[in-house]
Image (cartoon, rainbow, N blue to C red):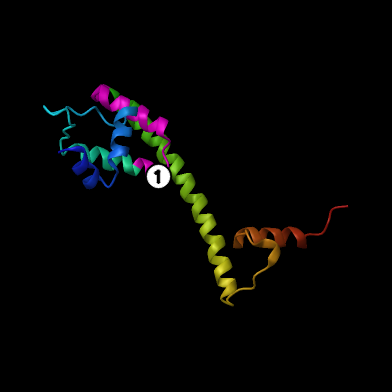
Amino acid sequence: MKIGELAKRAGLSAHTIRYYERIGLLPGAPRNASRQREYDASILVWIAFLGRLRTTGMPIRDMLRYAQLRERGSQTTEDRRLILEQHRTNVRARLAELHDCLAVLDTKIAGYSGLNTVEKDNDAATDHQTRHIRETLERPLKG
């Protein structure tokens, strides 16, 4: 398939496809007699995987390293696994951070809905953090 069709099927622009090819994320496509790139449909699976890595926040340099290892073949599976495991650890940490942020938003929304009181001074605090602050303030000072 030509680059326009690939771009359409992959949900990317032709410019992005060319960029990915230029930096090494995509293998160079063979060209037909008219010097146009001809892509095999199997490249769509790789592009979808790259999209997942991008969506989960993998830096381009790590994606490039993974792509380079992939091009070298099956003797690099251990290195590729390690890259993905490290990225999974990073994604899980980001998910935990987002979960905490979501809890803060839920608390604020509940407060504005009249379900809880909204305090100006603890806008960013989760319920757990608010309890900890209150307990700390209620403890007698050591003197």
Residue pointed to by mark 1: 56
Q: Nearer the viewer, residue 102 or 17?
A: 17
Taking 138 as reference, is 47 above or below it? Answer: above
* Residue located 64% across and 58% down the image: 129
Q: In this view, does 132 lie to the left or right of 60?
A: right
Q: Is residue 40 left or right of residue 94?
A: left
Q: What are the residue bounds of the magenta stretch? A: 53-75
Residue 24 seen in render: no
> What is the x, y in percent for residue 61?
41, 30
* Residue located 51% across and 59% down the image: 102
Q: Split into 4 quadrants, where in the image is the N terminus? A: top left
Q: Residues within 10 Å of mark 1 (few under 14, many from 20)?
A: some
Asked if residue 50 lies in the magenta stretch, the reply is: no
Taking 30 as reference, is 58 above or below it? Answer: below
Taking 24 as reference, is 129 above or below it? Answer: below
Q: What residue type is labelled 1?
A: Thr
Residue 85 seen in render: yes
Residue lying at the far front in this picture: please name it. 34
Question: Magenta residues: mostly which secondary structure?
Answer: helix
> What is the x, y in percent for residue 28?
24, 27
Label 1 sits on a secondary structure element that is loop
Q: In which quarter of the image is residue 38?
A: top left
Q: Quadrant of residue 67?
A: top left
Q: In which quarter of the image is residue 21?
A: top left
Taking 111 as reference, is 14 above or below it? Answer: above
* Residue located 36% across and 40% down the image: 53
* Residue located 74% across and 58% down the image: 136
> What is the x, y in percent for residue 89?
44, 40
